[in-house]
Amino acid sequence: MTIIEFCASITPSTLFAGVRSEADPMSTLYLSEEGNVVSNLCEEVTKFRRARKVLRLPHTTHPGTLFILARQNNPSAGPLRFSANKTELSPIEPAGPGRYRWYSVPIDPSKLVTGPNVFEFWGDETAMTAWALAIEAGHANPESYISDDAGGSWRNSRMGYLNVLRGEYVVRMRLDEGNDPPPPRMAWEEPDNARVSHLRAIAPSPVLAAGALLDRVKSLSTWLSTSWEHTNSMRASQYAPWDAETILAWGKSQVGHNGQRPNVMCVHYAVAFVSFCQAFGIYARGTAVGRTVNGPDGHFVAEVWFPEFKKWGMVDVNLDSMMWKDRVPMSISEVREAGSDLASLVRWGPGTNFQLTNPTIKSFIDNTYLTGNCFKHRGVWSRADFLSHPELAPAGHGSISYCESALVWEQPDINSGYGMFPYFGTEEYFEAPPV
């Protein structure tokens, strides 16, 4: 196998080169980050501490949509104020405090210019108690800036509320002109990678003894589902990296970086499963699902390619479950088409009872999982090479609203609240066998 690399840094020029069919809606998303956000290390804005984001845009004659990933800190914080090219526009009213979410704002083309466009953000409070902007660290020379004197002077280093980051604010613009790029091909692990080989060595004997593909899939799912207690961002803020062995170690001990309790939740079960599957020659990928881009009803599952059935089948490793119809594993598309009553289609594994000791899991199963609410939208994670390229894994997926540009959503989603993403695939893209 050959790893299919895609650009680690998305730029407007690469986005502008995409091709769509004439029947597809035409528009282009402009962004200068990938949405790799550490939610507890972002940027606070105040009346004096103002943030600036520069986006380079082409000439446009249509209204654009500005997307801002931000968090209101308290109910009395007031609106988030902002300007476009030195013209203050209507403030952004909060949707509710307590979590990062996407805010979308229509921008009249008369407020935009060809080339660098400057957007500035601030709050009404003088202390860091009003609004926070999401920031992606790790940029050498970002076109994002912070001011401590209400815009009198600016710097693009020592950013973030602790003044230790250098990065880009997660602010994006969608314009009618142009086309989004085609979605990238999946990137798989190299089978002879030392880390992948080591996973085979540490797998337990039931997994090693399992014979048929389905037996191995079930055995891996049950083993991982019972290996640690689901711990989400409401219970811990130390996010575990997308490294299967580290996830297992941190999850079992409930001790992570700097001795803190780790965040090891649904996405980590699926990520570890995907890596172990590849160690055994099984094609598996990670998929984010949810009802809305901002809602608390998101989930992360795995999909396995079953050659016998010539299809992808959903495997929920966190819940140790699959859904079946006519003795065939169901794909996410089929699960969604089944409607709001999925109880008769689920086959639970031994790991389910272990997970049900957590009351949060039972509530999720009853109110979100079996009702189908979490399957309204899906975004395939376009990389499965977490061990070969840990630097390309996200820093906090699931701890904030979906925001990573590596996710490929379905084409209708671009007009259903997911316009802040650059990649959209057809049904053929999602159902095609692994290459």
Image: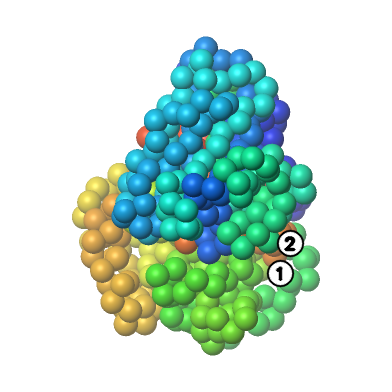
Asked whether the beta carbons under mark 2 and mark 1 sit within 8 Å of each other, the answer is: yes
Placement of 146 over or under 395, stated as above or below? above
Q: Is residue 280 left or right of residue 1?
A: left
Q: CA distance from mark 2 to mark 1?
A: 8 Å
Residue behind mark 1: 196
Q: Position of residue 256 (x, y in %)?
A: 58, 80
Measured as percent of width and height from the top left, residue 387 is found at 70, 65
Foreground: 383 or 176?
A: 176
Please name whichever residue, 288 or 156, is drawn nearer the observer in this view of the structure: 156
Could you say which disc has been placed on residue 388 in the image? 2
Whether residue 222 is visible to the viewer of this picture, yes or no, is: no
Left/right of residue 33 with respect to residue 318 in the rendered view? right
SS class, disc 2 = loop
Q: Position of residue 17 (x, y in %)?
A: 68, 25
Residue 224 visible in the picture:
yes
Q: Secondary structure at mark 1?
A: helix
Left or right, 64 with respect to 208, comes to left
Q: Residue at x 54, y 48 (%)?
A: 48
Q: Position of residue 1 (x, y in %)?
A: 74, 53
Which is more foreground, mark 2 or mark 1? 2
Q: Residue at x 22, y 51 (%)?
A: 340
Residue 229 is marked as none
Amino acid carrying mark 1 in the image: Val
